[in-house]
Image (tube, rainbow, N blue to C red):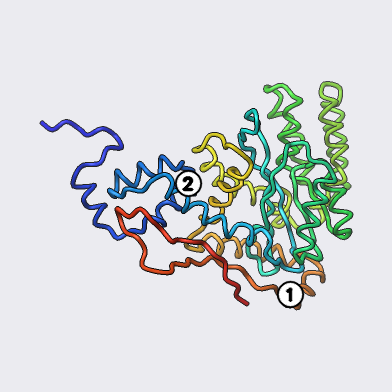
Amino acid sequence: MRAPRPRGQLRAEDRQEAAEVPVRVDEMVISLSAKGLTTGEVQAHLAEVYGAEVSRQTTSTIIDKVMDGMAEWQNRPLDPVYPVIFINAIHMKIRDGAVANRPIYVALAVTVEGRRDILGLWAGDGGEDAKHWMHILTEIKNRGVNDVLMLVCDGLKGLPDAVETVWPRTTVQTCVVHLLRNSFRYAARQDWDKIAKLLKPVYTAATEEAALARFAEFADAWGKKYPAIVRLWENAWEKFTPFLRFDTEIRRIVCTTNAIESLNARTRRAVKARGHFPNETAALKCVYMAIMSLDPTGKGQARWTMRWKTTLNAFDGRLSAARQQPQPPQLHRSFDRPGPGPGPGSRTSDWTLSWTRRR
């Protein structure tokens, strides 16, 4: 009787079959790194599965070449108008003296054609104020964005003031899901269901007046026991209500940051695999590579566009005018390989990631 092989251990015939599959070591290094594997783990995987002897230095060099395109991507020209921009943060453990949770902010936009466009990444320290957001938004504006119809965030301090300065006509919408989560922080666990039941009529009301009436009922029921929740909603009311002007179908999309949360969920897989990062640059590199590896088939982009078609029709003439303006050239990923690539067992690579402009 044959003993079962340990989980994760390849048989000799499996290893031989994998070695016969044509593969570029450089492509494998990038793919594995984008999933959060360290250089040592990438080296071990290539040796075990493909028999490729790739040093840690070579692996690190291949990854660093990818970063040559990050600066160009971060500074590429953007569209003049975006219907919606979502801003959210993913928190990562960064060792800068001592290990601390620090946010990496992601700005995800919807284009006038309904496509998804990630505008950039910015590292923060968790104490961002209006001045910090002013710097980020001004950078986006300087890259060609003249108008944003709506900006959705999760109550980031100082961001609404900065938006009003940079794009005065932009509507700032607080994420309703985050508002609910913050409400539960002030309540006992056994009261969460009751509170959620009474708050649902507030954010599903037909009009702002109806929402205000339902909130008054909630305040009468829970104001004495949880006054902090009432103050939380009162303080956020001005930024909470804009989405009530839209139809129900549109509200489901614009009232939360779920669109960007799904992106962050994919990124967190790579972050979780790494644990913590030695510095801010390493953290940004991990997020950038994870983002660049998303949706290789383009099917996700197609679903995204279909989902946003109805929503975009609800915006006013500012969007119609934007469709008539010439769009900046799009940057698309391409692979530059000056010569024949290395196969299994190679120690060198000339793989680079570049961006080409298409009109």
Q: Which residue is mark 1?
A: 323
Q: Residue at x 60, y 57 (%)?
A: 70
Instruction: Examine the rendered structure and indicate whether residue 26 appears above or below residue 216.
Output: below
Label 2 crowding class (10 Å Cα cut-off): few <14, some 14-19, many 20+?
A: many
Q: What amino acid does circle 2 point to? A: Lys
Q: Earlier in the sequence, mark 2 or mark 1?
A: 2
Query: Residue at coordinates 78% horizontally, 42% vertically from top-left?
Result: 156
Expressed as whole percent of the image width and height from the top left, the position of residue 249 reads 69, 56
Question: How many marks do you count on the picture?
Answer: 2
Q: Which residue is mark 2?
A: 35
Determine whether, in the image, residue 184 is placed left or right of residue 307: right
Between the C-alphas of marks 2 and 1, the distance is 37 Å
Q: Which mark is residue 307?
A: none
The quarter in which the N terminus is drawn is top left
Judging from the image, what secondary structure is the residue with disc 2 in?
loop
Q: Nearer the viewer, residue 174 or 219?
A: 174
Callout 1 secondary element: helix
The x, y position of residue 311, in whole percent, is: 70, 62
Q: Nearer the viewer, mark 2 or mark 1?
A: 2
Relative to residue 172, is residue 72 depicted above or below? below
Q: Is residue 100 left or right of residue 33?
A: right
Using residue 216 as the reference point, say whether residue 41 is left or right of it: left
Query: In which quadrant is the C terminus drawn?
Result: bottom right
Amino acid bearing label 1: Arg
Q: Position of residue 294 (x, y in %)?
A: 52, 55
| Residue ranking furthest to the left | 1
Residue 236 location in percent, x, y? 84, 40
Res 125 → quadrant: top right
* 133 lies left or right of 27: right
